[in-house]
Amino acid sequence: MIRFDNLRVRYPGATREALGGATFAAERGAVTAVVGPNGSGKSTLVRALLGRISLDGGSVVIDGERTVDLPRDRLARMVAVVAQREEPAFPLAVRDYVSLGRFPWQGAWAPPTAADRAAVAHALASADVELLASRRTDTLSGGEWQRVRIARALAQATDAIVLDEPTAFLDIAHEMACFELLAALARAGRCVLVVSHQLNLVARFTDRVVLLSQGMVVAEGAPVEVMRGDTLERVYEWPLVVSRDPAVGAPTLVPLRKPHPPIL
Amino acid sequence: MPRKAWFALVAVLVTVSLLALMLGATSVAPGDVWRALVGGGTDDATRAIVRTVRLPRVALALLVGGALGMSGSVMQATLRNGLAEPYLLGVSGGAAVGAVLAVAMGVSAPALIALAAFGGALLAVAGVLALTRAAGTRGDTRLLLMAGVVVGAFANAVIMVMMATATPDITRNALWWMMGSVAGAGWRDVVLLTATLGGVGLLLGHRARELDVLALGGDTAESLGVDVVRAARRFFILASLLAATTVAVAGLVGFVGLMVPHLARALTSGRARATLLASALGGASLVVAADLAARTVRAPSELPLGAVTALLGVPFFLWRLREGR
């Protein structure tokens, strides 16, 4: 459903391309993860999808249409994005905040329709934030806020949802719950694309993994195919081993220690 | 926002407006105010005081406050910053340069000074937009804020140089203008500002949901289908237009655009359309009350309106802050 086609991006003044011809696709009914070290171009992919940076080549294609040719409001009805960081300028009630996910579907003056209200209620329930609905966004914990943001994206009722490091501030339970939610969304037929540093969770929950390094796709496929010790060690430039999770059999990465030289 | 709060906002505005029509060098009873307004039986002198002297002044104060409150709430949402206000961002500085320049060149007709102020404000806004375009970062509203502050500082420097080299007479005139006043209110000003506030207000109401989304920040707004750069520029221009028109008819009336939106947000749910309307109502009440105080406290001499808004507004703001905790 979302295809990145030979995408090239170079930031002004940068010595090398942030994306040097990345090509891969994320399909409906699956969770696709993009992993890779810091600076490998993961967030640039998301920014390219949003149209926030100009492309030096290639395109992002959604359901056969290039994003640059799509009107913004149509794109917003096809793909929802949970960006890496977000802070509203002024606090809102959680329900009002989640309702803003309906923006691409609403006219200027008309009050919320039954469909709007149903989508918001469904989003609050799916992200398990119904109990927070009347809280203000500035009173939420990091984990609550992250789930509320996902609810806002769900209220957008799009076929595809893209999340940039959604578990960055979450504890183990919320991290697991978040990935369970993403898996459930994929089972419900949505296209889920998640950028993550949590390789072990990615290995357990996702259907496809795309490994980026220096703006290029260096490995792509099922988690067992991508999560190979030699590949990851080379890409992350750190000694590590990949074993099997004894409980679930998924590949598990264990970074090894490499002592820092003594500080005098 | 609860209906009670809306009712209270309107009731406060009606009350201060009525008081402003009643009080002054000659007090007029509420009944006589009503009869003078609807053309019933009062003496000619009372009718003249209410209709010709006080009504345009109260109307202009109301409109200036409404426009500044609305302008401030748009600026703060657009620039995602609670310190943003129409005057901080070059509008006031540009207008002041225009007006002081006109005064210094010997212009004395108020309409021409107003025109010069309006032109100066628009030039400053154009300067801000040109600066952001030259810097060329996409969708970063912080840049707009920076550019506004820079243009404002430049304008202040120009004013200081002009004041330092002007005759005391010109300096005094310019100073009075910079402190704001609705004393010279005429119906032409009222009509001009009504048209601007009505037109811009409708446009803003029409785009209020976009303003809500813009306040979430660039990436999220963009993902919801808003062209952040264009939308921010459009809101900035509309808010500046409101502020520039008030500056042209009443000089610089500070504080309203900064503080009133904060109070409005605390009263409302924080959604843009409600905040815009509440800011307009609150700003209107504040400026009508401030003008009433400015002309009655030390009558027959008048206090500068722009200072009284702050003198009245700050304690009220502090009280709200305590209540809100």
Image (cartoon, rainbow, N blue to C red):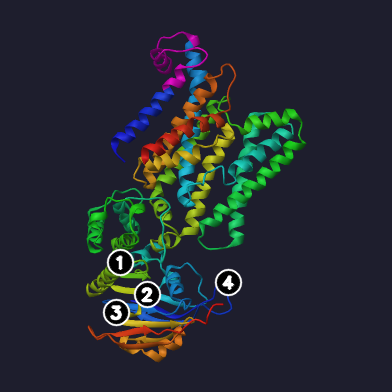
Q: Amino acid at mark 3?
A: Thr
Q: CA distance from mark 4 to mark 1?
A: 33 Å
Depicted A182 relative to depicted B152: above or below: below
* Image quarter of residue A163: bottom left
Task: Evaluate if marks 3 and 4 touch, with contact meaning CB atoms under 8 Å apart.
Answer: no
Numbered range of the magenta stretch: B18-45
**What subunit carries mark 1?**
A
Is the residue under label 2 in contact with that under label 4 (CB below 8 Å)? Answer: no
Q: CA distance from mark 1 to mark 2?
A: 21 Å
User: Tag 1: residue type?
Assistant: Thr
Please name the residue shown 30% across and 74% down the image: A191
- Residue A206: numbered disc: 3
Q: Chain of mark 3?
A: A
How far is mark 4 from mark 2, CA to CA? 26 Å
Secondary structure at badge 3 equals loop
Disc 4 vs disc 2: which is toward the camera? 2
- The residue pinned by badge 1 equals A158
